[in-house]
Image (tube, coloured by chain):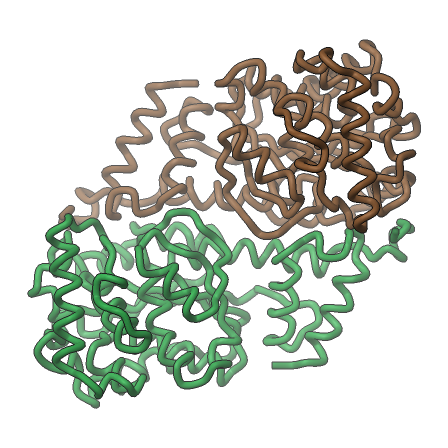
Chain colours: A green, B brown
Amino acid sequence: RDPEAEKQARDREGMLTKPPGSLGRLEELAVWLAGWQGRVKPKLDRVEVFVFAGSHGVTARGVSAFPAEVTAQMVGNFEAGGAAINQLAKQVGASLTVIPLHVDRPTADFTVAPAMDEEALLEAVNAGYDAVKDRPDLIVLGEMGIGNTTVAAALSTALLGGAGADWVGRGTGVDDDGLRRKASAVDDAVTCHGDALKDPIEALRRVGGRELAAMFGATLAARHQRVPVLLDGFVCTAAALPLASLDPDGLAHAWAAHVSAEAGHRRLLDAMQLKPLLDLGMRLGEASGACLAVNILRGAIACHNGMATFAEAGVSDG
Amino acid sequence: RDPEAEKQARDREGMLTKPPGSLGRLEELAVWLAGWQGRVKPKLDRVEVFVFAGSHGVTARGVSAFPAEVTAQMVGNFEAGGAAINQLAKQVGASLTVIPLHVDRPTADFTVAPAMDEEALLEAVNAGYDAVKDRPDLIVLGEMGIGNTTVAAALSTALLGGAGADWVGRGTGVDDDGLRRKASAVDDAVTCHGDALKDPIEALRRVGGRELAAMFGATLAARHQRVPVLLDGFVCTAAALPLASLDPDGLAHAWAAHVSAEAGHRRLLDAMQLKPLLDLGMRLGEASGACLAVNILRGAIACHNGMATFAEAGVSDG
């Protein structure tokens, strides 16, 4: 990041016509954007939303309230413009790119085998890495994949410990039996893969999924280009977890946009020391919570860039 | 409100291509707007922000970190377009109207006398009531007035009990001595006015202020026109408190847009059973927090109005 732009942005916040700190996290956001964009007055002209979709062999374990074919159907709905993320991306003035990753070819059931071989992992990571081009002002990440809250729970358990029951939630709406099946699937996966899960990338390959690997790749590409990132819900945050496990500073360019209603998300954010911007009981995925937060960032930079200083306005500064 | 539009809007939420409830509070917001606007698909074409400004005799007690003349200076800054609310109103596509209420003529110091006589109270309430014209789609309320977090604390203490120390906070940034002076001023006011404060309107006259009376009037006018309202921070919420005290359903048309960092606000929201949308550590007033939340409402209706149903999209509904 650019420490000089960050410092000048912080100084500017102190001169604007408001009591110091009174815009709260809006001030932090403006300074954060300034640092990563290398601009004292950040801009959000080019905001790009990426939704990655993948299919999961673990759905055979009865871990979702919806049938696995809904993943492909929802990709069609994204392409036709009918999903929540289509409306939200339009509302915040962002482009939307949907990237299906072999949705007709599920990963292996990770309770008995690695979800992906190395080639499949690399292909998915690259799909995400290559999506981030020419340094946009901000990227917003999200996903679609029936069964993938179980995948996120497995990856969280692998890298942060605990049992499956600590990390699973109701996802799209499973009943109590479904919740028990999810917890068992996670526990079985951890038993099956054992110590191999200690390596973050190997954990992503063995108990991850294609859309998670792609979000991991996109987050990494954003870091290399110094592009700020908004993370969405539980699955998206879990996809970024291997970066945090590899490097404690690995997600300094990313902000948790919201905490979802999915049970494991708050626990995961706490473990990763990410403080979410919004808490609206959302649990849809699709980058919906992250996209909604784009306008909070727009508000932050509108104030930061447009307000008068005490000197300009002739206001006494206390 | 319109129960038929509300019911149809709720039914529509259940048909859209997402797991039921997965948009969380966005779904509640869309249904709430539908009910008050009387439209199954609500709109936010005409959003009006009102900022009322007033001066307070209690500033003589040393309750603010800023001198009293800053109120008039900030009105000038609003008119010149340099304040936070100017940037935020523009960013959310809302009109902004600033209504100064005799800022050159402070209310009486309410620690020793009623803040306003009946004529002054009525004039201020009417200024707010008359500001709401021709049924806008949404109004957003806020204020400016050096010393008015002490006023809000006094009104909260009068109507909800407790001591001054329970309700005062650092406002624009007073030190520990300032905080003690604020608590004493509130306690002195409660002692001075005694049982007269049991009547909500009389409390508003005796320990309120002009901008609070105007926000009370605007909230009442909105109710009469069935216009939904976004409330801002501690002072704005305290101004609406007399309506809640008079009628438990009196604020059903209003939503707390955010919880501010001012100490008393969360306590006040809890007492009024209002659940804020945002929690971003803001404490500026000026309708800034409420204005920021307008885009959350825009996101809610974008999804509600624009998403495909399961039947339209050919997606299995679980």
Tell me: residue A215, above or below residue B214: below
Q: Is residue B134 visible?
A: no
The quadrant of the picture occupied by the N terminus of chain A is bottom right
Kindly identify the residue that appears in the image at 87 percent across and 18 percent down: B113
Instruction: Name the one closer to the observer, B279 or B311.
Output: B279
Tell me: residue B229, above or below residue A66: above
Kindly identify the residue that appears in the image at 55 percent across and 70 percent down: A137
Instruction: Name the one closer to the observer, A258 or A90.
Output: A258
Spot occupied by residue A297 in the image (x, y as percentages of width and height): 57, 59
| Outermost residue to the bottom | A118
Quadrant in the picture for residue B288: top right
Tell me: residue A236, above or below residue B89: below
Q: Is residue B210 left or right of residue A284?
A: right
Spot occupied by residue A171 in the image (x, y as percentages of width and height): 24, 55
Kindly identify the residue that appears in the image at 86 percent across and 30 percent down: B58
Quadrant in the picture for residue B196: top right
Q: In this view, does B141 lie to the left or right of B25?
A: right
Spot occupied by residue A257 in the image (x, y as percentages of width and height): 46, 60
Q: How many labels does the image show?
A: 0
Kindly identify the residue that appears in the image at 22 percent across and 65 percent down: A148
Q: Can residue B262 be seen in this view?
A: yes
Spot occupied by residue B235 in the image (x, y as percentages of width and height): 69, 34
